[in-house]
Image (cartoon, helix red, strand yellow):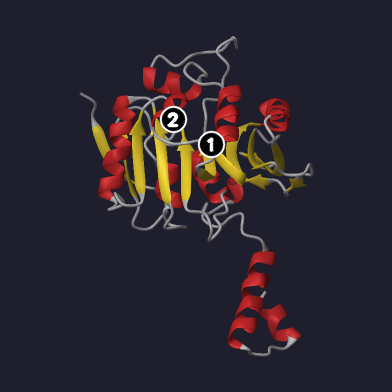
Amino acid sequence: MISKVKNDLFDYQNRYIMQIKDGFKFSLDSLLLAEFVNIRKSDKIILDMCTGNAPVPLILSLKTDALIVGFEIQKDISDLAQESVILNGLKDNIRIINDDIKNINKYYKTGTFDIITCNPPYFKTSEDGYKNKNDYLTLARHEITIDLESLFSIAKSYLKDNGVFYLVHRAERLDDIMYLGRINNLNVKDLQFIATKNGSVPNTILVKCVKNSKPGVKLRKEICVDNLSTYQHIFESRWNKWNLLWDWVILTKNTIRLDIMLALW
C-alpha cells in the first residue's frame, strides 16, 4: 500500500492534491500547461490525457464550469487523482477514468471534445538514457504505454472541428510535434519557449494546435521560470487587459479618456 500525503497545489487557493509521500509528484510542466490553456465560453467538455494525479484538471476547474475528463492508466495514480477531486469538492466538474487512453472509444464518440490537454511521457523508449527504477516515474516519463504519434492521432479523432490541442514537451521534440500536427490536421498555432534559468537555452515548449486550421504560428516571447514569483496568469497579455477594459466601456456605455486608459494599463 502506498503512503499518501495531502499537499497544497502550489499557490492556488483552495486547491489541494493527493500525492505519493516519497515518490510520484506533479511537475512544474503541468502547472505551465494548465496556465497556457485558454478556455472559451463555448467550451463544454475538456479531455486531459495522461492526467497523473490530476493537477491540470484541478487548475482548469478554476477557469471553467466545463466537464473535465482525466485519463490515467496507472491504478494507484488514478486513485490519487480521484481522491484529489473528492477532496476539492469537484465530483460534478471532473471525471477520472482509470484506463489506457487508447481505449477512449469505450467511453466517448469521436469529435466529442472542445479542448484536449496533455503532459505526456517525454522520452522515447529507444533513447539510451536512464529509466527510473520507480515504476510510476518510468511510465510517466518514458513512451512505454503511449507515444507522441498516438497522442496526436487521438487528439485528431476526438476533437471537434476547430477544437484545440494543448501540449507541453521537451523543446528538442519540436520537429516531431510540427510534423505530427501537420499530418493530423492539427496545425501548430501558438508556441511558447520556457527556460529554467536566466541565460539558459529553453528546454521546454508549450504548444497550441487547432484542428483543421490554416498554417501560421504565433511565437511568444521566451519565459524564464527563475523570474516568476507565481505561475498564475503568466500568459495573459496586456491586450487581454485592454480588451476587458474596452468590453467594460461598451457594456456600461461609459466614456473614458485615453490618458486614463493608459494609466489603467
Instruction: Give the CA distance from mark 2 to mark 1.
Output: 9 Å
Quick one: which residue is furthest to the front in this view? 109
Q: Is residue 76 above or below residue 241?
A: above
Q: Which quarter of the image is occupied by the N terminus? A: top left
Q: Give the image quarter of residue 172.
A: top right
Name the amino acid, label 2. Answer: Ile
Q: Is residue 6 visible?
A: no
Instruction: Tell me the quarter of the picture where residue 78 sits.
Output: top left
CA neighbours of label 2 inside 10 A, class few (<14), some (14 to 19), many (20+): some
Residue 175 appears in the picture as rendered: yes
- In the rendered image, residue 156, in percent from the top left (x then y), is placed at 60, 34
Q: Could you tell me the amino acid type at mark 1?
A: Tyr
Front-lying residue, 215 or 37: 215
**Figure check: 84 above or below 100:** below
Q: Position of residue 144 (x, y in %)?
A: 49, 16
Position of residue 260 measured from the top left corner of the image (x, y, whole percent): 69, 85
Residue that lies at the very extreme toward the right in this rendered image? 216
Residue placed under numbered mark 1 in the picture = 158
Q: Which residue is mark 2?
A: 104
Q: Position of residue 240 (x, y in %)?
A: 65, 65
Category of crowding for the residue at label 1, using alpha-carbon neighbours closer than 10 angstroms: few (below 14), some (14–19), many (at least 20): many
Regarding mark 2 in the picture, which secondary structure is present there?
helix
Q: Is residue 243 above or below residue 68?
A: below
CB within 8 Å, label 2 to label 1: yes
